[in-house]
Image: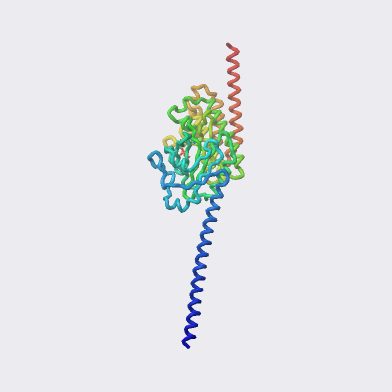
Amino acid sequence: MDAQILMYSGYAAVGLIIVIFVIIFRLHKRKKQGENVEAGKANKVASFDDNDTRSIITKSDQYVAGGSKSGFFVTSSAEQSANFASTSLLVLTSPVVNGLKFDDLLKAPAELLGRGRHSTLYKIVLENGVLLVVKRIKDWEISTDDFKLRMQRLNQVKHQNVLPAVAFYCSKQEKLLVYEYLQKGSLFRLLHGAQMGQAFDWVNRLSIAATIAETLAFMHQEFRSDGIAHGNLKSSNILLNKNLEPCISEYGLVPLDNQGFKADVCGFGVILLELLTGKLVKNEGVDLATWVHSVVSEEWTGEVFDKLLISGGASEERLVNLLQVALKCVNKSPEARPSMKQVAVMIVTLKEEEERSICTSVSVFSENF
Ligand SMILES: Nc1ncnc2c1ncn2[C@@H]1O[C@H](COP(=O)(O)OP(=O)(O)OP(=O)(O)O)[C@@H](O)[C@H]1O
């Protein structure tokens, strides 16, 4: 009997040991599977960067430049390390910033250029002296994937009068865009800055208007089927390149909107009104388009124009013609506004008339001397 009890206890002990081994083996296997899944995820994220891009891990929780915090990043370092696998700077094809690394942005001295409702803008200087601007976009309800797709799509369409992004960065918390810094400033500054448009005569204003109109018509045509309009067209987003030609910046950085193209036409109309009147869009609380309408309806049309244009000898007939185009663009009803293509045709026609009249006056002048 004792021998039997001893035998059964032995079986039980062996059985228990086997069960313990099986449990340990299963737990170990489960842990290994977990590690493989994590490794797989990391590989997947890394593979996004294969094409013409460089993946970088953020290092600090706040960007410190020249001793001052620029505030590129608002996320904590804990959040960042949790998300590091999805943080990457994508360098688009650009000769200006070949080989740009995220670290280069972090190290560069930065200066705050503007803080708007939807974004903050910094100017930075890279070690090699290249000047860039970094735009940090706030409150844009767009998924990381959609943002990447949008940036890649925008990068497929090039125009010499549109400033392309040279790189972008995107994580769940942050969306950054990097552009070349254009030193000649903006159309806004040319009109309303210290010079107050003094060195900006009618021929140049008309030429700039025609270039912006043609460029925007091109962009609308290219992005019509994607529904991507500029979305925030205004004179501070028209920069001047080194040849003082206009360069449209920040194209397509807003949510898709059915009325986006017509909103751009209205934005362009307001730019025309600024060029014609030399006045700010909002002056002592009065909206420029409303003011122009009120003056024109009282038949004081001549009063709306920038005195510098009149004293500079601009043809009042062509000023009025351009004003009529502007008023069509700012029509309260979006459906009644012309397309950018139609606007471009009207303004190019006016510009050609202007050029013909200059040629005629030059030849009359030379015949008389
Ligand atoms: N790439 C650039 N090069 C030089 N100056 C720039 C560049 N991008 C923007 N700026 C200028 O920096 C200033 C701030 O720009 P920011 O985009 O923050 O302001 P905004 O255009 O007035 O507003 P929003 O946030 O609605 O675009 C503006 O005067 C703008 O003309």
Is 256 or 93 nearer to us in this picture?
93
Q: Is residue 313 above or below residue 9?
A: above
Left or right of 40? Residue 122 is left
Residue 268 appears anywhere in the view:
no
Up/down of 52 relative to 26, above or below: above
Number of labelled discs? 0
Q: Position of residue 116 (x, y in %)?
A: 44, 41
Q: Give the residue displayed 47% in from the left and 52% down from the top.
A: 83
Q: Is residue 289 above or below residue 169?
A: above
Q: Which quadrant is home to the C terminus?
A: top right
In the rendered image of this protein, does residue 301 appear above or below residue 116? above
Pick whichever, 15 or 113, lies toward us: 15
Which residue is found at the position 45% from the left and 28% from the top?
196
Q: Is residue 107 visible?
A: yes
The colour style of the image is rainbow
Q: Residue furthest left?
A: 67
Which residue occupies the foreground of this view, 306 or 352? 352
Q: Where's residue 311, x and y in %?
A: 49, 22
Q: List the single residue furthest toward the front.
A: 3
Residue 94, percent across and down? 55, 37
Residue furthest to the bottom: 1
Measuring from the top left, give residue 88's x and y in whole percent: 51, 47
Image quadrant in which you'd find residue 230: top right
